[in-house]
Amino acid sequence: MRSLSEPVVWTNLLFFLNALLWLYAGLPTTAGLVAITAFASLSYHVFKESEPISKLIDHSCAYAALIWTLWVAHPMLSLIHIAVLATALVVGLIFKNYAHRTSYEAPHTYWHICVFIGQGVLAYACLLDP
């Protein structure tokens, strides 16, 4: 098992902050999905990515959260939001790809940070909607 002090683990806690932001935006269902996804990712990484069912749950939740939050937020996105989201996605995918080719922990941690930024932008856009 990994320790909570390892960056690839504790960065999952950032996703709970995203869930709180979605809740503050008045979207409890979205907040719940993001929180469940955060817990799934935390569980996957605590067990050193060794549990196949944990991997399936983590990846399924991550895709569901991505699709759902994009669908919820898309009407409120400005061009600046889209530019930040696209940048976070491209940079994040570079780190994610690199993590699977070399040392896993540091690049995957940066992937988590990019996801945190992306989810924050999506929730923030919903907060701005009158």
Image (cartoon, rainbow, N blue to C red):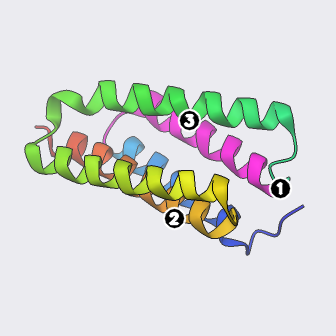
30 falls in the magenta region: yes
**Disc 1 and disc 2 in contact, CB within 8 angstroms:** no
Residue found 26% across the figure and 32% down from its top: 73
1 falls in the magenta region: no
Amino acid at the residue labelled 2: Tyr
Q: For the N terminus, which image quadrant?
A: bottom right
Q: Position of residue 122 (x, y in %)?
A: 30, 43
Q: Are there few (<14), some (14-19), or many (20+) residues within 10 Å of tag 3? A: many
* Mark closest to the chain's N terminus, 2 or 3: 3
Judge by depth and name the residue closer to the eye, 47 or 102: 102
Q: Position of residue 23 (x, y in %)?
A: 41, 42
> In the image, which is nearer the foreground, mark 2 or mark 3?
2
Residue beneath label 1, please?
48
In the rendered image, the residue lying farthest to the front is 101
* Mark closest to the chain's N terminus, 1 or 3: 1
* Mark closest to the chain's N terminus, 1 or 2: 1
**Disc 2 and disc 3 in contact, CB within 8 angstroms:** no
Q: Position of residue 68 (x, y in %)?
A: 41, 25
Describe residue 116's horizontal placement relative to residue 109 as left or right. left
Magenta segment boundaries in residue numbering: 25-46
Q: Position of residue 16 (x, y in %)?
A: 54, 52
Amino acid at the residue labelled 3: Ala
Residue beneath label 3, please?
62
Amino acid at the residue labelled 1: Lys
Secondary structure type for disc 1: loop
Describe residue 55's horizontal placement relative to residue 14 as left or right. right
Judge by depth and name the residue closer to the eye, 129 or 15: 15
